[in-house]
Image (spheres, rainbow, N blue to C red):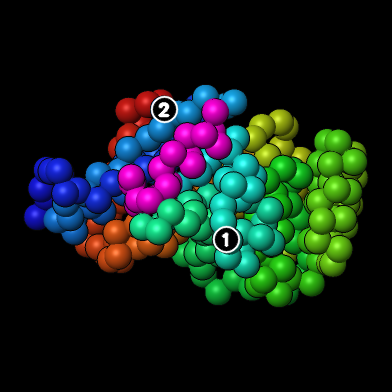
């Protein structure tokens, strides 16, 4: 049963800039209502130059925690007192937990989101051949960390600026190769998957991908991106960014509120309704 939060409510939220587009409040508040929790989940848009001051001011459980989105993920990791292995490997955190003793804990659930999305929308998929990651920013690093953890034998980082791709290769020092955008066709040769972790730019051609490959776009606005349209046109399996968002949100919800998201709540349908209204 849904209830209105009161003075004893558990509070969590999401911090980013800009933040108005975020679907995280839609997901978490739908789960809160479905679970009948005395809780609320709210968006925050701290100033870029004041993020650390904002986050540290929440020490001691002023709120339970924050999900973190661009452009603050790397800085969230830096300000935390401790971090899980996933966050350290990804070089960023999308989850900060504020403990009663004042300790700030950083976690990354982005890898869980990526792998969960593949498991749902490309059932039976395994990363048993090289995979391609488009982009070289924080999202690409989180993707690379997840792929390494899943046993992918080689990860090919394709980026417009070759030096940024090489920086990512240097950060991991194992199983990563850098490719400039001009060699994207070569990077996709024989790859089992392509994951777009870049915010924009043209979609590279997919004609050199094997027929059993899968293509994922972390972006979900629009849900059916040009890259996913091209993948479906080739008969490839397509994995959308909304699925990743939902699968990374679920462990965050449990960390904030101490219960798993209620399976009876169709948060994807709720998110799609909001996306349609915003279109």
* Frontmost residue, 151 versus 275: 151
Q: Position of residue 218 (x, y in %)?
A: 58, 46
Task: Assign a secondary structure to mark 2.
Answer: loop
1 to the left or right of 139: left
Q: Is residue 69 visible?
A: yes
Q: Is residue 227 above or below residue 86?
A: above
Residue 154 location, x and y as percent? 81, 66
Looking at the rendering, the stretch of residues picked out in magenta corresponds to 50-66
Is residue 231 visible in this depiction of the protein? Answer: no
Q: Residue at x 38, y 51 (%)?
A: 60
Within 10 Å of disc 2 (Cα), the crowding (few <14, some 14-19, many 20+) is few
Which circle's residue, 1 or 2, is located before the other in the chain?
A: 2
Q: Quadrant of residue 132?
A: bottom right
Residue drawn at (60%, 35%), measured in percent from left and top?
Answer: 71
Find residue 233 and report its horizontal and vertical position in percent.
62, 46
For mark 1, what is the residue? 82
> Is residue 277 on the magenta stretch?
no
Q: Find out whether residue 60 is within the magenta segment.
A: yes
Mark identifier at residue 20: 2
Left or right for 51, reference 194: left
């Amino acid at each position: 049963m849904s209830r209105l939060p009161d003075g004893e409510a558990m509070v969590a939220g999401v911090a980013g800039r800009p933040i108005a587009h975020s679907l995280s409040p839609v997901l978490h508040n739908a789960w809160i209502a479905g679970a009948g929790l005395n809780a609320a989940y709210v968006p925050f848009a701290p100033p870029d130059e004041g993020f650390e001051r904002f986050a540290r001011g929440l020490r001691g459980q002023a709120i339970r925690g924050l999900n973190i989105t661009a452009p603050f993920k790397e800085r969230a990791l830096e300000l935390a007192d401790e971090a899980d292995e996933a966050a350290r490997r990804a070089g960023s955190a999308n989850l900060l937990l504020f403990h009663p003793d004042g300790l700030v804990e950083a976690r990354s659930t982005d890898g869980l989101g990526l792998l969960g999305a593949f498991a749902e929308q490309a059932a039976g998929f395994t990363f048993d051949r090289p995979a391609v990651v488009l982009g070289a920013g924080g999202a690409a690093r989180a993707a690379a960390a997840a792929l390494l953890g899943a046993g992918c034998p080689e990860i090919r980082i394709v980026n417009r600026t070759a030096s940024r791709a090489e920086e990512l290769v240097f950060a991991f020092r194992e199983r990563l190769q850098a490719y400039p955008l001009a060699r994207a066709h070569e990077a996709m040769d024989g790859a089992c998957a392509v994951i777009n972790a870049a915010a924009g730019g043209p979609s590279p051609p997919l004609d050199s991908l094997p027929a059993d490959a899968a293509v994922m776009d972390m972006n979900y606005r629009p849900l059916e991106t040009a890259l996913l349209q091209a993948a479906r046109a080739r008969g490839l399996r397509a994995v959308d960014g909304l699925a990743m968002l939902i699968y990374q949100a679920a462990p965050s919800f449990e960390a904030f509120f101490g219960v798993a998201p209620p399976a009876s709540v169709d948060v994807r349908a709720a998110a799609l309704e909001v996306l349609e209204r915003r279109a």
